[in-house]
Amino acid sequence: MSALVTGGAGYIGSHMVLELLGAGEDVVVLDNLSTGFRSAVPDTAQFVEGNVGDAELVGQLLSDHAVDAILHFAGSIVVPDSMTDPLGYYGNNTCSSRNLLACAVDAGVPHFIFSSTAAVYGEPDTTPIGEDSTLRPISPYGSSKLMTEMMLADTARAHPLRYVALRYFNVAGADPQGRTGQSTPRATHLIKVASEAAVGLRPGLDVYGSDYPTPDGTCVRDYIHVTDLVRAHLDALRYLRAGGDSTVLNCGYGKGFSVLEVVDAVKRVSGVDFPVQTVDRRPGDPPALVAGAERIHSALGWAPQLNDLDTIVGHALSWERHLKATRGEG
C-alpha cells in the first residue's frame, strides 16, 4: 500500500514526504510545481507532475500505486491574495479538493488527511481556540478550507472513508537536518520573512498594524515547528489505520507570540538588527489566533519535540543561509 501526498514538493508537503519515508512508507507525490520544487522530493519517492483537479490522472495514480491514504497539502495559502482573487482560491482549494475526494471514493481509498487552517475560526470570541469554537472565516482562504472540511464530513457519512482534518496555526521553521525548508519566493510567513531580512535577502521587515487589541498592539499567533506538524500527520495516519473515527484537530502549541516578540527572537538568534517599519493593517488578519491543543494530544498521542520559539527561528535561519549560499543571492 502507498500514501499519496498532494503538494509534496512544497514547504509542508516536502517535510511530510521525508517523515513518511523515514517511517518506511511507500510514497507517491503529486505536485504541479506552481510553488513547489522538484528538488525537494527525494528520489526514493515516486514523483508525478500534475494537478489535483485532474481526475483522470489522480484516478490512475490511486489505482496504479494501491493508495490506501491521501495526505492533501496542495492548495493556495496566502490570505491577502485570497482577498483579491477569491474565485482563484475557491477553484484551487475547494473545487480541486472536491475532485480529489471523488477520486478517493471511486477508488475506495479509506483514509484521508486534510491540511486545514485556523483561518476557519475568523476572529474568535475567546482564546485559546477550541475545535468546537464558532466557525466564521473572514477571508476566502479560510472559507475555501472550511468548505473542504464540510465536504469531507458529508463524504464520510455517505461512503466508507474516514478522515482527520488538521487545522494548522502558524507553521514555521525547517527540517532540523537541513534537507528541506520554505523556499517559495514572495512568502508572507513572518518568521520566513524576518529570517530573510536577517541574512540580507530583504532590506527590512514591514509590521502590518500596531493598533490591534493585544498587549503590544501587533497580531499574536501560535507558531508550530513544521517537523512537529508533519509528525502529527503521521500520528493521524496511524490513528486512522488503527480504526480511529473521523475527527478535526487543532495543530498548535497553545502559546502565542506577538509579531514584535517574533522579530525580537529573530534578531536575538541571528545577532542581526535589521530595519523594521510599521505599515497599515492587511485585510483578513485577526488580532490573535492561539490553539486549544488538548484534543490532539489525547486523540493522537501527539508529543511535540520542537516547541520552542528560538529553536524554530534557528532552523528557519539555517535554511535561509543555505538558500542564500546555493542561489548565490546577496
Image (cartoon, grey):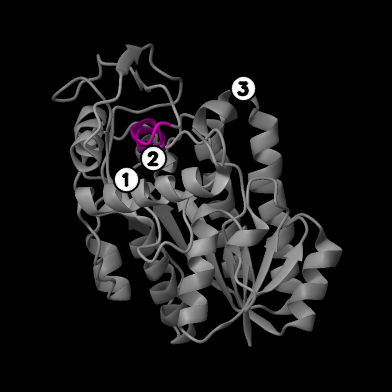
Judged by depth in the image, the label closer to the viewer, 1 or 2, is 2
Main secondary structure along the magenta-highlighted residues:
helix
Q: Image check: 186 left or right of 269?
A: right
Q: Are marks 3 and 2 in contact (CB under 8 Å)?
A: no
Q: Quadrant of residue 127?
A: top left
Say the numbered circle drawn on residue 84: 3
Which circle, 3 or 2, is nearer the viewer? 3
Residue 193 within the magenta-colored segment of the rendering: yes
Q: Earlier in the sequence, mark 1 or mark 3?
A: 3
Can you give x and y, in whole percent of width and height, for residue 77 in the image?
A: 54, 41
Few, some or many residues within 10 Å of mark 2 (<14, 14–19, 20+): many
Going by the picture, which residue comes out furthest to the left? 215
Q: Give the residue type that dot 3 points to.
A: Thr
Residue hosting label 1: 133
Q: Quadrant of residue 82?
A: top right
Q: Which residues are magenta?
A: 192-200
Q: Nearer the viewer, residue 310 or 64?
A: 310
Left or right: where 103 falls relative to 24: right
| Residue 195 makes an appearance in the image | yes
Q: Is residue 180 above or below residue 310?
A: below
Q: Residue at x 50, y 36 (%)?
A: 187
- Earlier in the chain: of badge 3 and badge 2, it is 3
The secondary element bearing badge 1 is classed as: loop
Q: Nearer the viewer, residue 308 or 39?
A: 39
| Cβ atoms under marks 1 and 2 closer than 8 Å | yes
Up-down: is 179 above or below 206? Answer: below
Query: Depth-wise, is mark 1 or mark 3 nearer the camera?
Result: 3
Judge left or right: residue 227 versus residue 113.
left
Residue type at the position of mark 2: Tyr
On the image, numbered disc 2 is attached to which residue? 121
Location of residue 189 in the rendering, given as x and y in whole percent from the top left corner: 42, 37
